[in-house]
Every structure is written in C-alpha cells, then in structure tokens.
Image: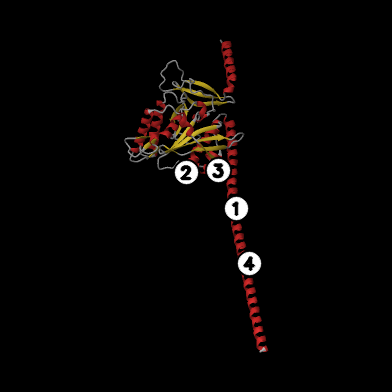
Amino acid sequence: MAADNDYQEALKMLRLHFLIEQEKTREQQQQFNEKERQLLLELEKMREERRIIEQTKAKLEDRRKIEQEKTKLEVRRIIELKNTKRMKIQNQHALSSINTGQTLLINHRDFYDYYVDGNIDSFDINFLSNENNSFNDEITNDIENYLNDISLLSTISEAATQKAFNKLIVNLLELFNGSAALKYLTTHNSSALEGFHPVCCFIYKNVNVDYKSESNCFQHFIVCLGEVKTPDISIDSKEAIGQICQYLSTSLYVQNRRKMYGFSTNFTHITFYYVEKKPYSTTYNFYKSQNLEMFNYSSPTSSSADAITKIEQSSNKYLNKETWKIFAKFLTMNADFYQYTALTINPVDDLLGDRYEISRKLGDGATSMVYSLAKTKDNYVNNDLQNYVVKISKRSSFKELFINEINIMKQLQQSNN
C-alpha cells in the first residue's frame, strides 16, 4: 500500500511538473510571438520611414530641378537684358523691349509653373458691387442683347465671342455718360504687348495712339487688359491663369509700374486679377479673385430672384446682376484705382486726341517720354501741321522741371526774335 501511495504521489508530481513545463513553454511561445510581432512592426516602420525618405528625396530633387531651371531662365533673362541694352547703345535708338525669360522664353503654362504656382493669393472683388450706383435698365438691356447674340449662334467660335464682347463693352462705355476714364481697344490682331496679343486693352479715353503699328509705343499706355475666351474653355486652367498673369507682369515690366489689374472671361464666368511688383525686387506677387458667374440657370422664383433678370429670348438663362454690377464698376472706377503710373496722364487732359494720334516713340529720358504725333485721317483742319511732338512726364513730381524747361524755351524764342 505504501508503495502504491508513493507511486501515485510520484505520478502526480510528474504530471504537475509536466503542466508547469507546458505552461512555461506556452509563455515562452507567447513571448516569442510578441517579439516576432514587434520585430515585424519595427521592420514595417523602417520600410515606411525609408519610403518617406525616398519620397522626400524625390521631392527635393524635383524642387532642385525646378530651382535649377528658374536659375537658368534668370541667367538667360539677364543675358537678354544685357544684349538689349548693348543693342540700344550700338543702334542709338530707344526701343522698349522687355526681353525677359519670364515672357519671351516660356509659354503661358510654363509661366504658371515657374512664377505663379505657389505665389498667387486670393482677393475679394465684391467690394466693387457696393460702390455701383450707375447700373440702370439701359445697361441691363445691353447685357441681355449680348447674351442673345451669343445664344443665337449655331457655333460659338472665338472670333464670334470676341466680336460680341467688343460690341458690349463699347456700348457700355458709351452708356456710362463720361463717368468712365477708360477707352476700349480690340488688340488680339496686333502685337500690342511685346509680341503678345491680349484680346482687349484699356487706355485712358483722351489718349489716341496707333496700336496697330510696329513701333511698340502703344504698350506704354495700357491701363488694364483682359482676355476673352469661348464658353467651352476654362478660365481656371493653369494655361489661362498663366496667360493673364504673364500679360500683366510683362506690362508692369515695360511700364515700370507697381500694380496692374486685368480680367479673364469665357462668357459664362469672369475672374479678376491684379499683379503687384514686390518692393525692391524684380519679382511679382499675383492675386486672383473668386470666379464669378455672369449668367446662371436659376428661376425667377428662386431665393436669388432679386439678383437676376430674366432674358426673354433665352428661357433658361439669366444674367447675374451682382456680377455685372462689379464689372460695370470696374470699368468706371476713378483713375487712381487703376494705379497707372507709367506716365503722368490725367484722363481729362487735352492730348489733341481728336486731331492727332501718337504714332511712335522718339525718346526716353529720366523724367519723360517723347512721342511723335501724326495728323489723323479725319482731321481736315488746314492750319494743323502734319506732325507734332508731345513730351509726357513720368512723375508729377517732375512738374517744376517741365515748367523750368518751358520758361527756358520761351526765353530762347524771345532772344531769337
């Protein structure tokens, strides 16, 4: 009996030892599994960090290439400027030419990628709608006729869109009864701006300049400009944004101005822009307004019925009156708003525009620009000479210098007599 008890006791001890060892083995396996899991997590983390490092390297390489390309373009710009200056000295004439990499050496999309992307901010153009008190039924009717002209076309071509827009703007400026300081010119068929062809340009209404000639003097007088596209072309594409920004910055460079406004429209929408030269720099900041609907498809019974007017000839389209108020005000702001500082021109000054037109630039000095005036074809005044010369100051602060120059000329005349 004692032997059986000892055997049973030994067996129990053996089983207990087995269970203990089995539990230890299970715990060790769990520890191993946990370590393996941790190792796999560490490995995955290392892979993720490596992937992020590779992506960062790729982005840095792309950025390096872009910066390298910008540097190349800047070098080319400097070389072009030096060549231009040397040619001016050699040829003894003063032809204004921007000749920068940012305009002549790249297309609109490249201009956006290199100069605009990441350097364009938004601004709110709605402040203009609060200042417009001149919007009336006649203006509304002209805009409705514009919608009809486009809506009735079987094929909406670029030429037809631009023609309808040209007609509208000319009519609107007439209806503003002299409150507008601007005059509208269709320039898409002329190299109005350093070889570029902006669809439309605005100059002061008292300026009469030959914008079709090859003299390039027209670009000195551009106050603001715009692009007009067909409804099927987006004005929010990088190409379209780059185009208007390239035109504005080119004009700023040519005119040595600080700020310039413009717009881009495709009949259904309009977006306003302005470009501003950075202080003490040759680079620019770009600004873009919200994309405004010029027409919509809302019904007169909708919540926005007070802001739209039904066009009878086109049952499903309505003009967005608030947008057109903004555009009308943009065209009728006082001269200070446009910040045209290339030349000291007051829109109410008499520049002999009804009898002469500015035909070419004769000289470019530190304080003024000198132009040749040619007698217009419809000027039948016998006493008018065929040509005159006009000298326009670059800054109002040079007024005393001009007065002094006039007095000296008067004294010379008296001494000659």
Q: Which residue is mark 2?
A: 237
- Seen from the viewer's position, the closer of residues 27 and 369 is 27
Marks 2 and 4, the one that precedes in the sequence: 4
- Number of the label disc, if any, that sits on residue 317: none
**CA neighbours of label 3 inside 10 A, class few (<14), some (14 to 19), many (20+):** few
Give the percent coordinates (x, y) of residue 221: 50, 28
Residue furthest out toward the top = 417
Q: Residue at x 61, y 55 (%)?
A: 53
Residues at marks 1 and 2 touching, judged by CB atoms closer than 8 Å: no
Q: How is the image coloured?
A: secondary structure
Q: Which residue is mark 3?
A: 118
Give the percent coordinates (x, y) of residue 70: 58, 43
Marks 3 and 4, the one that precedes in the sequence: 4
Q: Is residue 413 above or below residue 345?
A: above
Residues at marks 2 and 4 touching, judged by CB atoms closer than 8 Å: no
Distance between the Cα atoms at labels 3 and 4?
47 Å
Res 236 seen here: yes
Task: Tell whether 405 sits left or right of 294.
Answer: right
Q: Residue at x 59, y 19 (%)?
A: 400
Distance between the Cα atoms at labels 1 and 2?
28 Å
Marks 1 and 2, the one that precedes in the sequence: 1
Question: Where, quadrant-wise, is the C terminus in this rendering?
Answer: top right
Q: To which quarter of the image does residue 331 belong?
A: top left
Residues at marks 3 and 1 touching, judged by CB atoms closer than 8 Å: no
Task: Tell whether 16 sits left or right of 151.
Answer: right
Q: Is residue 26 above or below residue 14?
A: above
- Number of the label disc, if any, that sits on residue 56: 1
Distance between the Cα atoms at labels 4 and 1?
31 Å
- Seen from the viewer's position, the closer of residues 179 and 360 is 179
Q: Residue at x 46, y 30 (%)?
A: 130
- Number of the label disc, if any, that sits on residue 35: 4
